[in-house]
Image (tube, coloured by chain):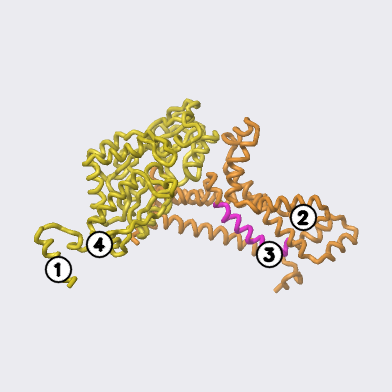
Chain colours: A yellow, B orange
Amino acid sequence: MIYRFRLSLFLLAGLLATTPAFAQELSGTLKKVKESGTIVMGIRESSYPLSYLDDKQQPIGYHIEICNKIVEAVKRELEANLKVQHQPVTSQNRIPLVTNGTVDIECGSTTNNEARQKQVAFAVTTFVTNVRMVVKKASGITSLSQLDGKPVATTSGTTSVQLMRAHEKGKNVNFKEVYGKDHADSFLLLETDRAVAFVMDDNLLAGLVTSSKNPQEYAIVGEVLNIEPIAIMMRKDDPAFKKIADDTIRGLIKSGEIEKLYNKWFLSPIPPKNVNMNFAMSETLKGLIKNPSDAPAEFYNKK
Amino acid sequence: MKYHWNWGIFFEQIKYGDETYLSWLISGLGWTVAVSLASWVIALLLGFAIGTVRTTPRTWLVRLGNAYVELFRNIPLLVQMFLWFFVVPEFLPRNLSLWVKQEMPAKEFVTATVCLGLFTSARIAEQVRAGIQSLPRGQRMAGLAMGLTLPQTYRYILLPMAFRIIIPPLTSEFMNVFKNSSVAFAIGVLELTFQARQMQEDSEQGIETYLAVTVLYFVCAFIANRMMAFIEKRSRVPGFIAAAK
Protein backbone atom coordinates (compact mmCIF):
# COMPACT_ATOMS: atom_id res chain seq x y z
CA MET A 1 0.00 0.00 0.00
CA ILE A 2 2.71 2.38 1.03
CA TYR A 3 4.74 1.33 -1.94
CA ARG A 4 1.84 2.16 -4.22
CA PHE A 5 1.35 5.47 -2.52
CA ARG A 6 5.01 6.33 -3.02
CA LEU A 7 4.88 5.16 -6.57
CA SER A 8 1.92 7.36 -7.31
CA LEU A 9 3.66 10.27 -5.65
CA PHE A 10 6.67 9.53 -7.76
CA LEU A 11 4.59 9.60 -10.90
CA LEU A 12 2.86 12.75 -9.78
CA ALA A 13 6.22 14.32 -9.16
CA GLY A 14 7.35 13.32 -12.58
CA LEU A 15 4.26 14.85 -14.05
CA LEU A 16 4.84 18.11 -12.29
CA ALA A 17 8.40 18.03 -13.60
CA THR A 18 9.83 18.93 -10.22
CA THR A 19 12.70 17.09 -8.59
CA PRO A 20 11.87 16.23 -4.98
CA ALA A 21 14.59 14.45 -3.06
CA PHE A 22 13.16 10.97 -3.17
CA ALA A 23 12.98 11.08 -6.91
CA GLN A 24 16.76 11.05 -7.01
CA GLU A 25 19.20 8.48 -5.82
CA LEU A 26 20.47 9.97 -2.57
CA SER A 27 24.19 9.82 -2.01
CA GLY A 28 26.92 11.04 0.30
CA THR A 29 26.00 13.21 3.27
CA LEU A 30 22.32 13.51 2.30
CA LYS A 31 21.98 9.71 2.28
CA LYS A 32 23.83 9.35 5.59
CA VAL A 33 21.75 12.08 7.22
CA LYS A 34 18.47 10.67 5.92
CA GLU A 35 19.30 7.17 7.14
CA SER A 36 20.48 8.20 10.61
CA GLY A 37 17.86 10.93 11.06
CA THR A 38 20.62 13.10 12.54
CA ILE A 39 22.85 15.79 11.15
CA VAL A 40 26.07 16.47 13.05
CA MET A 41 27.21 20.08 13.14
CA GLY A 42 30.85 20.71 14.05
CA ILE A 43 31.12 23.78 16.30
CA ARG A 44 33.94 25.75 17.94
CA GLU A 45 33.94 26.64 21.62
CA SER A 46 35.60 30.04 21.39
CA SER A 47 35.89 31.33 17.83
CA TYR A 48 34.23 34.69 18.52
CA PRO A 49 31.95 35.73 16.91
CA LEU A 50 31.81 33.04 14.23
CA SER A 51 31.15 30.02 16.39
CA TYR A 52 31.29 29.83 20.17
CA LEU A 53 29.40 28.76 23.28
CA ASP A 54 27.17 31.17 25.20
CA ASP A 55 26.78 31.17 28.99
CA LYS A 56 24.33 28.27 28.75
CA GLN A 57 26.89 26.25 26.72
CA GLN A 58 24.78 26.55 23.58
CA PRO A 59 26.57 27.16 20.27
CA ILE A 60 25.90 30.62 18.83
CA GLY A 61 27.55 32.90 16.29
CA TYR A 62 27.55 34.15 12.73
CA HIS A 63 28.47 30.80 11.17
CA ILE A 64 26.11 28.89 13.47
CA GLU A 65 23.18 30.99 12.20
CA ILE A 66 24.19 30.40 8.59
CA CYS A 67 24.56 26.66 9.28
CA ASN A 68 21.11 26.54 10.89
CA LYS A 69 19.68 27.93 7.64
CA ILE A 70 21.55 25.24 5.69
CA VAL A 71 20.19 22.54 8.01
CA GLU A 72 16.66 23.91 7.44
CA ALA A 73 17.25 23.63 3.69
CA VAL A 74 18.49 20.03 4.09
CA LYS A 75 15.34 19.20 6.07
CA ARG A 76 13.18 20.66 3.31
CA GLU A 77 15.12 18.78 0.66
CA LEU A 78 14.83 15.44 2.49
CA GLU A 79 11.34 16.21 3.79
CA ALA A 80 12.50 14.75 7.08
CA ASN A 81 12.61 16.08 10.59
CA LEU A 82 16.30 15.80 11.42
CA LYS A 83 17.85 15.86 14.85
CA VAL A 84 20.73 18.33 15.01
CA GLN A 85 23.68 17.19 17.06
CA HIS A 86 26.49 19.59 18.03
CA GLN A 87 30.04 18.25 18.08
CA PRO A 88 32.76 20.56 19.44
CA VAL A 89 35.88 20.47 17.25
CA THR A 90 39.37 22.02 17.49
CA SER A 91 41.68 23.26 14.78
CA GLN A 92 43.63 19.99 15.09
CA ASN A 93 40.77 17.54 14.73
CA ARG A 94 38.22 19.35 12.55
CA ILE A 95 39.45 17.96 9.21
CA PRO A 96 39.82 14.33 10.36
CA LEU A 97 36.36 14.49 11.97
CA VAL A 98 34.81 15.72 8.73
CA THR A 99 36.61 13.22 6.48
CA ASN A 100 35.85 10.23 8.74
CA GLY A 101 32.14 11.05 8.90
CA THR A 102 31.83 12.11 12.57
CA VAL A 103 30.90 15.66 11.55
CA ASP A 104 28.65 16.39 8.55
CA ILE A 105 29.04 20.16 8.38
CA GLU A 106 31.69 22.19 10.17
CA CYS A 107 30.56 25.66 11.21
CA GLY A 108 33.67 27.21 12.73
CA SER A 109 36.44 29.45 11.48
CA THR A 110 38.27 27.34 8.92
CA THR A 111 40.41 28.95 6.21
CA ASN A 112 39.71 27.62 2.74
CA ASN A 113 43.11 26.84 1.18
CA GLU A 114 44.54 24.54 -1.47
CA ALA A 115 46.10 22.03 0.94
CA ARG A 116 42.76 21.59 2.69
CA GLN A 117 40.85 21.29 -0.56
CA LYS A 118 42.71 17.99 -1.08
CA GLN A 119 40.88 16.65 1.99
CA VAL A 120 37.56 18.53 2.20
CA ALA A 121 35.23 20.91 0.38
CA PHE A 122 34.11 24.40 1.37
CA ALA A 123 30.86 26.28 0.87
CA VAL A 124 31.13 29.71 -0.74
CA THR A 125 33.10 32.10 1.44
CA THR A 126 31.09 33.78 4.19
CA PHE A 127 33.86 35.65 6.01
CA VAL A 128 37.31 37.01 5.20
CA THR A 129 40.12 37.63 7.65
CA ASN A 130 43.40 39.48 7.12
CA VAL A 131 46.55 38.31 8.87
CA ARG A 132 48.02 41.36 10.66
CA MET A 133 49.61 42.17 14.02
CA VAL A 134 48.49 43.58 17.33
CA VAL A 135 50.92 45.73 19.32
CA LYS A 136 50.86 47.86 22.43
CA LYS A 137 50.16 51.43 21.28
CA ALA A 138 52.97 52.71 23.50
CA SER A 139 55.55 50.78 21.45
CA GLY A 140 54.92 52.98 18.40
CA ILE A 141 55.24 50.03 16.04
CA THR A 142 53.24 50.34 12.82
CA SER A 143 55.09 48.14 10.33
CA LEU A 144 56.85 44.79 9.99
CA SER A 145 60.11 46.59 9.21
CA GLN A 146 60.24 47.89 12.80
CA LEU A 147 60.41 44.39 14.24
CA ASP A 148 64.12 43.72 13.60
CA GLY A 149 65.60 41.79 16.51
CA LYS A 150 62.36 42.01 18.48
CA PRO A 151 60.38 39.08 19.89
CA VAL A 152 57.19 38.46 17.90
CA ALA A 153 54.48 36.13 19.19
CA THR A 154 52.33 33.73 17.27
CA THR A 155 50.40 30.56 18.05
CA SER A 156 51.96 27.14 17.51
CA GLY A 157 50.18 25.16 14.83
CA THR A 158 49.67 28.29 12.71
CA THR A 159 51.78 29.52 9.82
CA SER A 160 52.03 33.24 10.60
CA VAL A 161 55.81 33.22 10.94
CA GLN A 162 56.29 31.83 7.46
CA LEU A 163 53.90 34.51 6.20
CA MET A 164 55.99 37.23 7.84
CA ARG A 165 59.18 35.86 6.28
CA ALA A 166 57.51 35.61 2.89
CA HIS A 167 56.22 39.20 2.96
CA GLU A 168 58.43 41.67 1.09
CA LYS A 169 58.61 44.02 4.09
CA GLY A 170 59.65 41.12 6.31
CA LYS A 171 62.36 39.65 4.09
CA ASN A 172 65.31 41.51 5.62
CA VAL A 173 63.92 41.61 9.14
CA ASN A 174 65.30 39.26 11.75
CA PHE A 175 62.37 38.21 13.95
CA LYS A 176 62.78 36.42 17.23
CA GLU A 177 59.61 34.36 17.17
CA VAL A 178 58.01 33.19 20.42
CA TYR A 179 55.09 30.79 20.53
CA GLY A 180 51.95 30.44 22.63
CA LYS A 181 50.09 27.15 22.60
CA ASP A 182 46.78 28.90 21.83
CA HIS A 183 45.68 32.44 20.97
CA ALA A 184 45.02 33.37 24.60
CA ASP A 185 48.59 32.30 25.51
CA SER A 186 50.05 34.23 22.60
CA PHE A 187 48.18 37.34 23.70
CA LEU A 188 49.54 36.80 27.21
CA LEU A 189 53.05 36.87 25.67
CA LEU A 190 52.28 40.35 24.34
CA GLU A 191 50.52 41.48 27.51
CA THR A 192 53.49 40.49 29.72
CA ASP A 193 56.06 42.08 27.34
CA ARG A 194 57.56 38.78 26.21
CA ALA A 195 56.70 39.86 22.70
CA VAL A 196 56.22 43.30 21.14
CA ALA A 197 53.73 42.08 18.53
CA PHE A 198 51.35 39.16 18.00
CA VAL A 199 50.64 38.11 14.42
CA MET A 200 47.29 36.45 13.70
CA ASP A 201 43.93 36.75 11.90
CA ASP A 202 42.70 40.27 12.55
CA ASN A 203 39.19 39.25 13.65
CA LEU A 204 40.70 36.98 16.33
CA LEU A 205 43.03 39.81 17.40
CA ALA A 206 40.06 42.19 17.63
CA GLY A 207 38.26 39.66 19.83
CA LEU A 208 41.28 39.24 22.12
CA VAL A 209 41.74 42.99 22.43
CA THR A 210 38.07 43.60 23.20
CA SER A 211 38.08 41.03 25.98
CA SER A 212 41.47 42.11 27.43
CA LYS A 213 41.88 44.09 30.64
CA ASN A 214 42.81 47.36 28.90
CA PRO A 215 41.50 47.31 25.32
CA GLN A 216 42.60 50.93 24.69
CA GLU A 217 46.27 49.93 25.21
CA TYR A 218 46.38 47.86 22.01
CA ALA A 219 46.18 48.56 18.30
CA ILE A 220 45.94 46.31 15.25
CA VAL A 221 48.51 47.65 12.79
CA GLY A 222 50.82 46.86 9.90
CA GLU A 223 50.77 45.23 6.52
CA VAL A 224 48.22 42.59 5.55
CA LEU A 225 50.33 39.42 5.41
CA ASN A 226 47.64 37.19 3.99
CA ILE A 227 43.99 37.36 3.01
CA GLU A 228 42.14 34.27 4.20
CA PRO A 229 38.64 33.28 3.09
CA ILE A 230 36.83 31.58 5.99
CA ALA A 231 34.08 29.13 5.05
CA ILE A 232 31.78 26.38 6.21
CA MET A 233 33.44 23.00 5.63
CA MET A 234 32.04 19.68 4.43
CA ARG A 235 33.13 16.40 2.84
CA LYS A 236 34.73 16.39 -0.58
CA ASP A 237 33.07 15.03 -3.71
CA ASP A 238 29.54 15.52 -2.42
CA PRO A 239 28.03 17.94 -4.97
CA ALA A 240 24.40 17.47 -3.85
CA PHE A 241 25.14 18.53 -0.27
CA LYS A 242 27.48 21.34 -1.31
CA LYS A 243 24.80 22.67 -3.68
CA ILE A 244 22.28 22.96 -0.82
CA ALA A 245 24.84 24.80 1.31
CA ASP A 246 25.93 27.12 -1.51
CA ASP A 247 22.36 27.84 -2.62
CA THR A 248 21.34 28.66 0.94
CA ILE A 249 24.21 31.13 1.30
CA ARG A 250 23.54 32.66 -2.13
CA GLY A 251 19.91 33.04 -1.02
CA LEU A 252 21.01 34.85 2.14
CA ILE A 253 23.18 37.13 0.02
CA LYS A 254 20.42 37.86 -2.47
CA SER A 255 17.89 38.69 0.23
CA GLY A 256 20.40 40.95 1.99
CA GLU A 257 20.10 38.82 5.10
CA ILE A 258 23.85 38.11 5.19
CA GLU A 259 24.54 41.80 5.84
CA LYS A 260 22.01 41.79 8.67
CA LEU A 261 23.73 38.73 10.18
CA TYR A 262 27.13 40.42 9.76
CA ASN A 263 25.90 43.57 11.50
CA LYS A 264 24.38 41.51 14.29
CA TRP A 265 27.57 39.58 15.08
CA PHE A 266 30.38 41.96 14.12
CA LEU A 267 28.96 45.45 14.65
CA SER A 268 26.64 45.11 17.65
CA PRO A 269 27.12 43.96 21.25
CA ILE A 270 27.12 40.16 21.43
CA PRO A 271 26.70 37.72 24.32
CA PRO A 272 28.00 36.62 26.76
CA LYS A 273 29.78 39.87 27.79
CA ASN A 274 27.76 42.20 25.57
CA VAL A 275 30.84 43.62 23.91
CA ASN A 276 30.91 45.01 20.41
CA MET A 277 33.66 43.61 18.15
CA ASN A 278 33.33 46.73 15.93
CA PHE A 279 34.80 44.83 13.03
CA ALA A 280 33.80 46.42 9.72
CA MET A 281 33.35 44.24 6.65
CA SER A 282 36.59 43.98 4.64
CA GLU A 283 36.71 45.03 0.98
CA THR A 284 37.40 41.42 -0.03
CA LEU A 285 34.25 40.21 1.71
CA LYS A 286 32.18 43.03 0.18
CA GLY A 287 33.40 41.86 -3.22
CA LEU A 288 32.60 38.24 -2.40
CA ILE A 289 29.06 39.16 -1.44
CA LYS A 290 28.62 40.64 -4.91
CA ASN A 291 30.23 37.61 -6.56
CA PRO A 292 30.11 34.56 -4.25
CA SER A 293 33.07 32.19 -4.67
CA ASP A 294 34.68 29.17 -3.03
CA ALA A 295 38.19 29.97 -4.28
CA PRO A 296 41.00 29.07 -1.84
CA ALA A 297 43.24 31.60 -0.05
CA GLU A 298 45.94 31.20 -2.70
CA PHE A 299 43.60 32.91 -5.18
CA TYR A 300 43.60 36.15 -3.13
CA ASN A 301 47.32 36.19 -2.39
CA LYS A 302 48.89 35.77 -5.79
CA LYS A 303 52.50 36.74 -5.63
CA MET B 1 36.72 7.48 5.28
CA LYS B 2 37.76 9.65 2.38
CA TYR B 3 41.27 10.55 3.47
CA HIS B 4 43.71 11.79 0.87
CA TRP B 5 46.89 9.85 1.70
CA ASN B 6 50.20 11.37 0.72
CA TRP B 7 53.28 9.69 2.15
CA GLY B 8 55.50 11.80 -0.09
CA ILE B 9 54.49 14.86 1.96
CA PHE B 10 57.68 14.70 4.05
CA PHE B 11 59.79 15.52 1.01
CA GLU B 12 57.56 18.36 -0.17
CA GLN B 13 58.38 22.01 0.44
CA ILE B 14 56.55 23.96 3.12
CA LYS B 15 54.04 26.52 1.87
CA TYR B 16 56.09 29.68 2.35
CA GLY B 17 59.78 28.85 2.24
CA ASP B 18 62.23 26.37 0.82
CA GLU B 19 62.52 23.89 3.70
CA THR B 20 60.88 20.46 3.49
CA TYR B 21 58.52 19.07 6.13
CA LEU B 22 61.15 16.42 6.88
CA SER B 23 63.64 19.13 7.84
CA TRP B 24 61.03 20.52 10.26
CA LEU B 25 60.64 17.14 11.93
CA ILE B 26 64.41 16.57 12.10
CA SER B 27 65.04 19.95 13.73
CA GLY B 28 62.17 19.14 16.12
CA LEU B 29 63.80 15.81 16.96
CA GLY B 30 67.06 17.64 17.66
CA TRP B 31 65.39 19.91 20.24
CA THR B 32 63.55 16.96 21.78
CA VAL B 33 66.85 15.13 22.31
CA ALA B 34 68.55 18.29 23.61
CA VAL B 35 65.81 19.07 26.15
CA SER B 36 65.64 15.43 27.24
CA LEU B 37 69.37 14.86 27.73
CA ALA B 38 69.98 18.20 29.44
CA SER B 39 67.11 17.70 31.87
CA TRP B 40 68.20 14.11 32.46
CA VAL B 41 71.60 15.38 33.69
CA ILE B 42 69.87 17.83 36.07
CA ALA B 43 67.47 15.12 37.20
CA LEU B 44 70.22 12.57 37.95
CA LEU B 45 72.41 14.99 39.90
CA LEU B 46 69.59 16.49 41.96
CA GLY B 47 67.70 13.22 42.25
CA PHE B 48 70.67 11.35 43.70
CA ALA B 49 71.56 14.20 46.07
CA ILE B 50 68.04 14.59 47.41
CA GLY B 51 67.28 10.88 47.51
CA THR B 52 70.44 10.28 49.52
CA VAL B 53 69.74 13.13 51.90
CA ARG B 54 66.32 11.63 52.66
CA THR B 55 67.94 8.48 54.14
CA THR B 56 70.41 10.26 56.41
CA PRO B 57 69.91 10.48 60.20
CA ARG B 58 69.55 14.31 59.97
CA THR B 59 65.84 14.91 60.50
CA TRP B 60 65.78 18.46 59.08
CA LEU B 61 67.51 17.28 55.90
CA VAL B 62 65.03 14.42 55.55
CA ARG B 63 62.10 16.84 55.96
CA LEU B 64 63.55 19.24 53.42
CA GLY B 65 64.05 16.39 50.95
CA ASN B 66 60.52 15.09 51.52
CA ALA B 67 59.07 18.56 50.98
CA TYR B 68 61.01 18.92 47.71
CA VAL B 69 59.77 15.59 46.39
CA GLU B 70 56.16 16.27 47.34
CA LEU B 71 56.26 19.75 45.79
CA PHE B 72 57.45 18.58 42.39
CA ARG B 73 55.54 15.30 42.37
CA ASN B 74 52.15 16.75 43.24
CA ILE B 75 51.86 19.38 40.48
CA PRO B 76 51.14 18.35 36.88
CA LEU B 77 54.11 18.80 34.56
CA LEU B 78 52.19 21.09 32.20
CA VAL B 79 51.24 23.39 35.08
CA GLN B 80 54.87 23.45 36.23
CA MET B 81 55.93 24.51 32.73
CA PHE B 82 53.51 27.43 32.85
CA LEU B 83 54.58 28.35 36.40
CA TRP B 84 58.26 28.55 35.42
CA PHE B 85 57.58 30.36 32.17
CA PHE B 86 54.78 32.79 32.97
CA VAL B 87 54.67 33.16 36.77
CA VAL B 88 58.21 32.96 38.16
CA PRO B 89 59.66 35.86 36.05
CA GLU B 90 56.90 38.18 37.35
CA PHE B 91 58.38 37.91 40.86
CA LEU B 92 61.83 39.04 39.75
CA PRO B 93 62.94 42.69 39.95
CA ARG B 94 61.59 44.73 37.00
CA ASN B 95 64.85 44.87 34.99
CA LEU B 96 65.81 41.25 35.54
CA SER B 97 62.24 40.23 34.75
CA LEU B 98 62.35 42.06 31.40
CA TRP B 99 65.74 40.54 30.64
CA VAL B 100 64.45 37.02 31.34
CA LYS B 101 61.34 37.67 29.25
CA GLN B 102 62.99 39.31 26.23
CA GLU B 103 66.78 39.00 26.17
CA MET B 104 67.67 35.70 27.85
CA PRO B 105 69.13 33.43 25.16
CA ALA B 106 67.11 30.28 24.41
CA LYS B 107 64.68 31.14 27.21
CA GLU B 108 62.10 28.53 26.23
CA PHE B 109 64.76 25.81 26.10
CA VAL B 110 66.28 26.82 29.44
CA THR B 111 62.89 27.03 31.16
CA ALA B 112 61.71 23.69 29.78
CA THR B 113 64.98 21.95 30.69
CA VAL B 114 65.00 23.26 34.25
CA CYS B 115 61.32 22.42 34.69
CA LEU B 116 61.56 18.89 33.30
CA GLY B 117 64.84 18.32 35.17
CA LEU B 118 63.36 19.29 38.54
CA PHE B 119 60.15 17.34 37.92
CA THR B 120 62.11 14.19 37.05
CA SER B 121 64.59 14.72 39.90
CA ALA B 122 61.74 14.40 42.41
CA ARG B 123 60.81 11.03 40.94
CA ILE B 124 64.46 9.87 40.91
CA ALA B 125 64.91 11.05 44.49
CA GLU B 126 62.05 8.79 45.50
CA GLN B 127 63.61 5.83 43.68
CA VAL B 128 67.04 6.48 45.20
CA ARG B 129 65.50 6.64 48.68
CA ALA B 130 63.68 3.36 48.07
CA GLY B 131 66.86 1.76 46.70
CA ILE B 132 68.95 2.76 49.73
CA GLN B 133 66.24 1.71 52.17
CA SER B 134 65.95 -1.69 50.51
CA LEU B 135 69.52 -2.51 51.53
CA PRO B 136 69.88 -4.53 54.75
CA ARG B 137 70.45 -2.26 57.76
CA GLY B 138 73.62 -4.24 58.49
CA GLN B 139 75.47 -2.72 55.53
CA ARG B 140 75.29 0.82 56.88
CA MET B 141 76.17 -0.40 60.39
CA ALA B 142 79.11 -2.47 59.11
CA GLY B 143 80.45 0.51 57.20
CA LEU B 144 80.28 2.79 60.20
CA ALA B 145 81.68 0.08 62.47
CA MET B 146 84.72 -0.24 60.18
CA GLY B 147 85.49 3.41 60.87
CA LEU B 148 84.16 4.90 57.61
CA THR B 149 82.50 8.28 57.99
CA LEU B 150 78.85 8.61 56.99
CA PRO B 151 79.69 10.17 53.58
CA GLN B 152 82.24 7.40 52.98
CA THR B 153 79.69 4.73 53.88
CA TYR B 154 77.33 6.23 51.28
CA ARG B 155 80.05 6.67 48.66
CA TYR B 156 81.63 3.21 48.91
CA ILE B 157 78.89 0.91 50.22
CA LEU B 158 75.31 2.16 50.03
CA LEU B 159 75.10 4.17 46.79
CA PRO B 160 76.90 1.66 44.51
CA MET B 161 74.52 -1.07 45.70
CA ALA B 162 71.39 1.13 45.59
CA PHE B 163 72.24 2.34 42.08
CA ARG B 164 72.27 -1.21 40.74
CA ILE B 165 68.96 -2.01 42.40
CA ILE B 166 67.16 0.99 40.90
CA ILE B 167 68.40 0.65 37.32
CA PRO B 168 65.04 -0.77 36.11
CA PRO B 169 62.93 2.17 37.43
CA LEU B 170 65.65 4.57 36.24
CA THR B 171 65.30 3.06 32.79
CA SER B 172 61.60 3.94 32.81
CA GLU B 173 62.47 7.42 34.02
CA PHE B 174 64.99 7.95 31.22
CA MET B 175 62.36 6.90 28.69
CA ASN B 176 59.80 9.16 30.41
CA VAL B 177 62.09 12.16 30.01
CA PHE B 178 61.89 11.82 26.23
CA LYS B 179 58.12 11.40 26.27
CA ASN B 180 57.54 14.16 28.84
CA SER B 181 59.67 16.58 26.83
CA SER B 182 56.68 16.81 24.45
CA VAL B 183 54.98 19.06 27.02
CA ALA B 184 57.62 21.72 26.26
CA PHE B 185 55.74 22.65 23.07
CA ALA B 186 53.29 24.50 25.31
CA ILE B 187 55.85 27.19 26.17
CA GLY B 188 57.15 27.38 22.62
CA VAL B 189 60.15 25.04 22.48
CA LEU B 190 60.44 24.06 18.82
CA GLU B 191 60.57 20.34 19.60
CA LEU B 192 59.00 17.37 17.88
CA THR B 193 55.38 17.81 19.03
CA PHE B 194 55.55 21.51 18.17
CA GLN B 195 56.83 20.77 14.66
CA ALA B 196 54.19 18.07 14.24
CA ARG B 197 51.47 20.63 14.98
CA GLN B 198 53.05 23.07 12.55
CA MET B 199 53.32 20.43 9.88
CA GLN B 200 49.77 19.19 10.29
CA GLU B 201 48.45 22.75 10.04
CA ASP B 202 50.60 23.64 7.05
CA SER B 203 50.23 20.40 5.07
CA GLU B 204 46.82 19.09 6.22
CA GLN B 205 48.29 15.58 6.20
CA GLY B 206 47.69 15.01 9.90
CA ILE B 207 47.68 11.23 9.90
CA GLU B 208 51.05 10.86 8.16
CA THR B 209 52.49 13.56 10.40
CA TYR B 210 51.47 12.03 13.69
CA LEU B 211 52.39 8.49 12.59
CA ALA B 212 55.90 9.71 11.73
CA VAL B 213 56.16 11.52 15.06
CA THR B 214 54.95 8.41 16.91
CA VAL B 215 57.72 6.37 15.29
CA LEU B 216 60.34 9.01 16.17
CA TYR B 217 59.29 9.12 19.85
CA PHE B 218 59.23 5.34 19.95
CA VAL B 219 62.75 5.15 18.53
CA CYS B 220 64.03 7.72 21.07
CA ALA B 221 62.50 5.89 24.02
CA PHE B 222 63.68 2.55 22.69
CA ILE B 223 67.27 3.74 22.29
CA ALA B 224 67.10 5.08 25.85
CA ASN B 225 65.87 1.69 26.98
CA ARG B 226 68.70 -0.19 25.21
CA MET B 227 71.34 2.18 26.60
CA MET B 228 70.11 1.57 30.13
CA ALA B 229 69.95 -2.17 29.51
CA PHE B 230 73.60 -2.03 28.43
CA ILE B 231 74.56 -0.13 31.59
CA GLU B 232 72.59 -2.61 33.67
CA LYS B 233 74.46 -5.51 32.12
CA ARG B 234 77.90 -3.93 32.43
CA SER B 235 77.44 -2.84 36.04
CA ARG B 236 76.08 -6.15 37.23
CA VAL B 237 77.86 -7.59 40.29
CA PRO B 238 77.94 -11.41 40.14
CA GLY B 239 76.08 -12.90 43.05
CA PHE B 240 74.22 -9.68 43.81
CA ILE B 241 70.49 -9.49 42.94
CA ALA B 242 70.71 -11.55 39.74
CA ALA B 243 73.28 -14.25 39.27
CA ALA B 244 75.57 -13.64 36.31
CA LYS B 245 74.68 -15.90 33.45
Q: Which residue is mark 1?
A: A7
Coordinates of residue A90 in the picture (x, y in percent): 43, 51
In 3D space, how far apart are the residues under numbered discs 4 and 3 (Cα atoms)?
61 Å
In 3D space, how far apart are the residues under numbered discs 2 and 4 (Cα atoms)?
69 Å
In 3D space, how far apart are the residues under numbered discs 1 and 4 (Cα atoms)?
20 Å
Q: Is residue B122 magenta?
A: no
Q: Of circles 1 and 3, which is in front?
A: 1
Coordinates of residue B122 in the picture (x, y in percent): 68, 53
Residue at the image position 42 percent from the left and 37 percent from the top? A274
Q: Which mark is residue B54?
A: 2
Q: Of circles 2 and 4, which is in front?
A: 4
Q: Which residue is mark 4?
A: A27
Dividing the picture into quadrants, the one containing residue A100 is bottom left
Answer left or right for A183 relative to A245.
right
Q: Looking at the picture, which amino acid does disc 1 mark?
A: Leu
In 3D space, how far apart are the residues under numbered discs 2 and 1 (Cα atoms)?
86 Å
